[in-house]
Image (cartoon, rainbow, N blue to C red):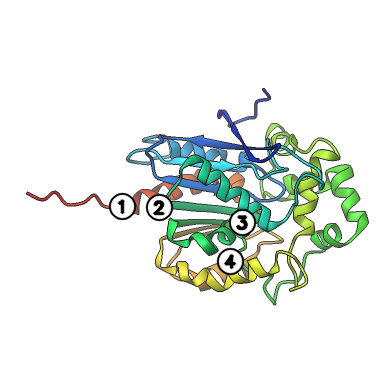
Amino acid sequence: MQTFPDYPFTPRRFQVRPGIAMSYLDEGPREGEVVLMLHGNPSWSYYWRKLVSGLSGPASAEGGSGKGYRCIVPDHVGMGLSDKPDDAAYTYTLQSRIEDLDRLLEQLGIGEDITLAVHDWGGMIGFGWALQQARRIKRLVILNTAAFPLPAAKPMPWQLKLGRDYNLGALAIRGFNAFAAGAARVGTRRPMPQDVRAAYLAPYDSWANRIATLRFVQDIPLSPRDRAWSLVERAGQTLPEFADRPAFIGWGLRDFVFDRHFLEGFTTALPNAQVHAFEDAGHYVLEDKAEVLVPAIRGFLDSHRPRPAPVRG
């Protein structure tokens, strides 16, 4: 089995749909509080590796306290180490992602008190799932993502528009891995080590294996004509309902997609959130700022653990 730096985990697999296997991590104590981490495009569960290591142990090197957390980290179908079916076998839409997530949690018997951690498309998947499952979410960890349509003041980046709407962009993504390779180079402010960059790109090593990196871009909702629009619009409308739950926001301000416009959308909807924003971090904020964010997130979660029931004589 191929190994990746800082990824000492053994992925598991299950049949999320007939003939289609989803890869996922399930790390930490079985009885621990669940932290569900959802990646975006063009990354995979590898993005969350340092947070998994920092949360799954009982007293992490990052200074955590108390028992460890159970970290559930799927690779979306077509991404990471999951199967990569063609369009005839799988419908690459936001709705499919939400259904896959629900099936995974059902398979694992995950119930209430979930901490939802999201990045990039993970926000739309996670908050789309939450439209029917909000009661199960206890805390939020939000990193450079969206849970609402493109803000009116934010122009669509030309790089995404090219891949979404033009054959030339589609050819660059599937033929030359331009989206994953570009994200690995411009998604951080400090250059990724070569072996880390190679790990980000490893799952997307052929035309066939890059199908999801393109389909995610093509599924970006910009108007009611787009398939994902109604889900993302509804997620944005309900986002303020999560203001009563503890929320942690970690944000790289040098992200050319999920920039200050998106950060403002979250801070407006979640005014009590604990915000850590970095002028010297980009889209892959956990790559730029893991040494700050991992202990901060651990401290945030530890400080919002459920209080034990009082002992009655």
Residue at 44% in and 69% down: 243
Residue 170, horizontal then vertical, whole percent: 88, 52
| Tag in front: 3 or 4 | 3
Q: CA distance from mark 1 to mark 2?
A: 9 Å
Secondary structure found at label 1: loop
* 31 relative position to 291: left or right: left
Specify which label sits upstream in the sequence, 4 or 2: 2
Q: Which mark is residue 263?
A: 4
Specify which label sits upstream in the sequence, 1 or 2: 2
Q: CA distance from mark 2 to mark 3?
A: 18 Å
Asked if the residue at tag 2 contacts the one at tag 4, i.e. Cβ–Cβ closer than 8 Å, the answer is: no
Asked if the residue at tag 2 contacts the one at tag 1, i.e. Cβ–Cβ closer than 8 Å, the answer is: yes
The residue beneath circle 2 is: 113
Q: Name which quarter of the figure residue 160 lies in.
A: bottom right
Q: CA distance from mark 4 to mark 2?
A: 25 Å
**Amino acid of disc 3:** Ile
Label 2: how many Cα within 10 Å (few below 14, some 14–19, many 20+): some
| Tag in front: 4 or 2 | 2
Secondary structure found at label 3: helix
Q: Which mark is residue 125?
A: 3
Label 4: how many Cα within 10 Å (few below 14, some 14–19, many 20+): many
**Amino acid of disc 4:** Leu
Whether 260 is drawn above or below 191: the answer is below
**Amino acid of disc 2:** Asp
| Tag in front: 1 or 4 | 1
Residue 227, horizontal then vertical, whole percent: 74, 65
Specify which label sits upstream in the sequence, 1 or 4: 4
* 129 relative position to 109: left or right: right
- In the displayed orientation, state which residue is furthest to the left: 313
